[in-house]
Every structure is written in structure tokens, then in C-alpha cells.
Amino acid sequence: MKFRPWSNPVPFILITLVSIIIGRIIEYFIHESGHFATAWMMGITMTPDPMQAIITTPIHITRYQTGIYGFSESFQYIPYMSGLDVSSASMTAIGGLLFNALAAVLCFWIFLKSRGIKYKSLMTLSLWVLIFNLGALFSYIPMRVFEVTGDVGFFLSSLSVHPVIFLFPTLILIAAGLIIYFSVILPLYCLSIPVKNKFIRFFILLCSTIILFMYMAGPISTELRISDIMTLPEMINIFPVLVIGQCIFLIALLLVGLLRLNSLQSSRYLGAKKKVA
């Protein structure tokens, strides 16, 4: 009897969990490599190299860890900031997020432009790499826009840009990416594999939502300081709205994803596709 892991719920869940772990490591590598690459383009040599940082650093999926060597500033770019010109300092600081955004765009392209992709494992890995990179962007924007230190804080202060000017355009783009993920990418993935089991579909949706929640909760619960908000008096009124808005938005994404996945009829879709072929 031929073993079909993609049709069996238990192996499929195991494949999903392994892909989630790998996706988290890839996102971490992409973000820190962004700092490394932009610094290198600015003529700065940093240690350790990206691969060494991956090997020596604990990987935490549940929340952000600060003060652990090799995690947030594994390439130690902060000591170089004072000696850099404005453009070099800003690009080095924001390089990690730029690479996260590029990785997300690449994953969107894989799904939207390469629907006939034959390798289910690559499609599965791309799904989780995508949500992790979107989550990384969502963890920095909007909450970390108010920090006076860190990637976004150094970027804004280097260019003397007010947080609000940076906040809303980037927030709209990230929100659009998340809406596309839950309303288009997840259903497309379930149709392409295909995932006919409704429990497995809900499991994938739940994992995506939990990952996004952990990224969202990280800066709120561990890193964001009230003093950062107090430096911008007009932000005191906006901050609670953003926190509540993020929670409502996350619930809305979950509901949208649930409705879209419940409406799928993958067997009928695939049957029609075979007839056309």
C-alpha cells in the first residue's frame, strides 16, 4: 500500500509543524541577514556571519528575546551607528525589515504566479515563511514605530522622520498583505495540495493566527517602554487605539480565513481542473 503523507491527517500535521519550525528559522535568518547585507553594502564588516548566528543562537518561536547574543542585533550594528552618515545608518537599521518584505513578496509571487507548482513541500514551506515574514513586519509596525531605539527607531531618528509619517503608509501595506494571506493564499494553498479535511484546514488557519498573535504580542508585553510613548505626547491617545485595533484586526483575519476555508470545495475544483486538462 502506497504511503500518502499529504492525504493522511497525522503525517500532514507533522509536516506542517516541521515546516513551521523551519519557516521561523528562515525568517530569523532573513531578518538578521538584512542587517548584515546592508551594512556590508555600506562598507561595514560585522561578526559573526549569518550562518554562525543561526547555529549559536537559541530559536524562540513563542516570543522575542532581548539580551540574548545573536538574536536582535546579532551583527552588532548599533556600535557603528554613531560613525555612519545618515543614509548608511538608516539603511543598516531598516535592512532587516526590508529583507522581510522582499521575502514576503517572493512568497506571494510563488503562490500567485506559480499556481501549478509541483512540489507540495516547497509550497508548504513557502506558506509558513510568508506568514513569519508578515508577522515580523507586523511586530515592528505599528508598535515599534514608537521606540526611540531598535531598528525602526534608529531608522526614523537617522532621517529625522516623524513616526506618524512612517506609520500609516507602511501599516496599510502590511494590513493588505495579511488580508491577502488569509483571504487568498490560505484557500489557494488548500486547493493546491489539496487539503480536503476541514479539521486540517482549521489547524493551518489556527497556526497562522497564533504565529501572528505572538509577533503582535511580543513588543507589547516584553520590549515596548512607556517612556518611548511619553516622548511623543500626541501618541498617548493613539497608542491604545492601535493596540485595540490590532486585536480587532487579528480577530477579523481569523473570521475571514474561516469563512473562506469553509466555502472551499476542493474535490469539485480539482475534478473540474482534471477535465479541462
Image: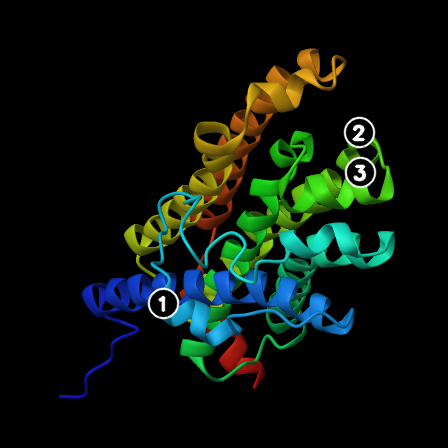
Q: In which quarter of the view is residue 165 placed?
A: top right
Residue 271 vertical position relative to residue 175 in the rendered view, above or below: below
State the quadrant of the N terminus: bottom left
Numbered mark located on residue 166 in the image: 3
Give the residue number, with chain letter if any, for mark 1.
56
Q: CA distance from mark 3 to mark 1?
A: 34 Å
Residue 155 vertical position relative to residue 38 in the rendered view, above or below: above
Q: Secondary structure at mark 2?
A: helix
- Horizontal side of 15 relative to 104 (left or right) equals left
As shown in the figure, which amino acid type bears the numbered disc 1? Thr
Numbered mark located on residue 164 in the image: 2
- Horizontal side of 153 relative to 143 (left or right) equals right
Q: Secondary structure at mark 3?
A: helix
Count residues near mark 2 (Cα–Cα under 10 Å), then give few for <14, some for 14-19, many for 20+: few
Residue situated in front as seen by the camera: 84 or 153: 84
Residue 87 pos. (x, y %):
86, 56
Q: Are marks 2 and 1 in contact (CB under 8 Å)?
A: no
As shown in the figure, which amino acid type bears the numbered disc 3? Phe
Closer to the camera: disc 3 or disc 1?
1
Residue 173 pos. (x, y %):
73, 46
Q: Residue at x 24, y 80 (%)?
A: 4
Residue 81 vertical position relative to residue 162 in the rendered view, above or below: below
Q: In which quarter of the view is residue 45 placed?
A: bottom right
Q: Are marks 3 and 2 in contact (CB under 8 Å)?
A: yes
Residue 20 pos. (x, y %):
37, 61
